[in-house]
Amino acid sequence: MGVGESATVTRQPKAGLDAKTYSSTIVFAGHYNGGIQVEPVHVDLRFMVDKKHEYYTYDITVDGQQQDSIVFSSTEGYTQLPDAVLVEITNTGTNAIKGLDVAITGDDVFTLDKAGLSAELAVDAQTGVRLTPKAGVEAGIYKAVLQVSGKDADGNAIESKSIAVVFTVGAK
């Protein structure tokens, strides 16, 4: 680094630390142009975690893939339903999620099978639901939103996640 130049160093604690005081030291060292060693500068950092922060988060995948939406299509008068999709929910947080639920709102042309849904989801655990369009839907574009919600250990709602669902039925 040249004369008059500056640099910024950022140090961020890891997530999920226990409540206590932590300390760390950053050492800046180097050499002058001629190879003479510069006296190291020690910067001591201290911070305190009051309460362990608990993370309640989850990911939603559709048939094993991250997607922005679920899209079905068929032709008016169809006799075979489009294949069901598996919507998987994985707990990616640091605590179990309780009261897990999945709901669909919007056009009433979808069947949501919650038979495999677990109401409580341990850390790194996975559960899921199956979504299928209903039979006999007339030509048109139908839209809905599949929403996943849950609660923390104290029964407080955690951030819900949703995914758009579209069913296009073409005219004969």
Image: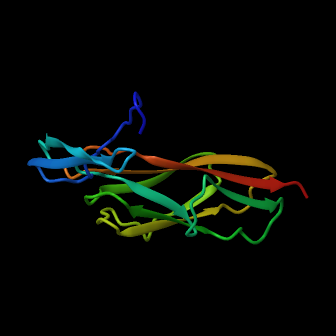
Name the one closer to the observer, 11 or 71.
Answer: 11
Q: Nearer the viewer, residue 133 or 37?
A: 37
What residue is rendered at 80% in x and 66% in y?
78
Q: Position of residue 168 (x, y in %)?
A: 76, 53
Of residues 56 and 137, the one drawn nearer to the viewer in this rendering: 56
**Residue at 33% in and 48% down:** 31
Q: Colour scheme of this structure image?
A: rainbow
Residue located 51% across and 48% down the image: 162
Q: Is residue 151 above or below residue 8?
A: below
Give residue 45's position: percent from left, percent from top. Answer: 17, 42
The quarter of the picture where residue 117 lies is: bottom left
Q: Is residue 75 above or below residue 146?
A: below
One can see residue 119 in this view? yes
- Single out the residue that lies furthest toward the left: 20
Lateral position of residue 12 relative to residue 128, left or right: left
> x%, y% of residue 93?
32, 57
Q: Is residue 52 visible?
A: no
Q: Quadrant of residue 47?
A: top left
Q: Please identify the residue farthest to the top as the structure is shown.
A: 4
Quadrant of the snapshot with the N terminus: top left
For the residue pair 111 and 154, the one nearer the viewer reads as: 154
The image shows residue 148 at horizontal and vertical percentages of: 44, 52
Residue at the far right: name it: 172
Count of marks, rendered view: 0
Q: Residue at x 30, y 63 (%)?
A: 120
Q: Is residue 50 left or right of residue 5?
A: left
Q: Quadrant of the C terminus?
A: bottom right
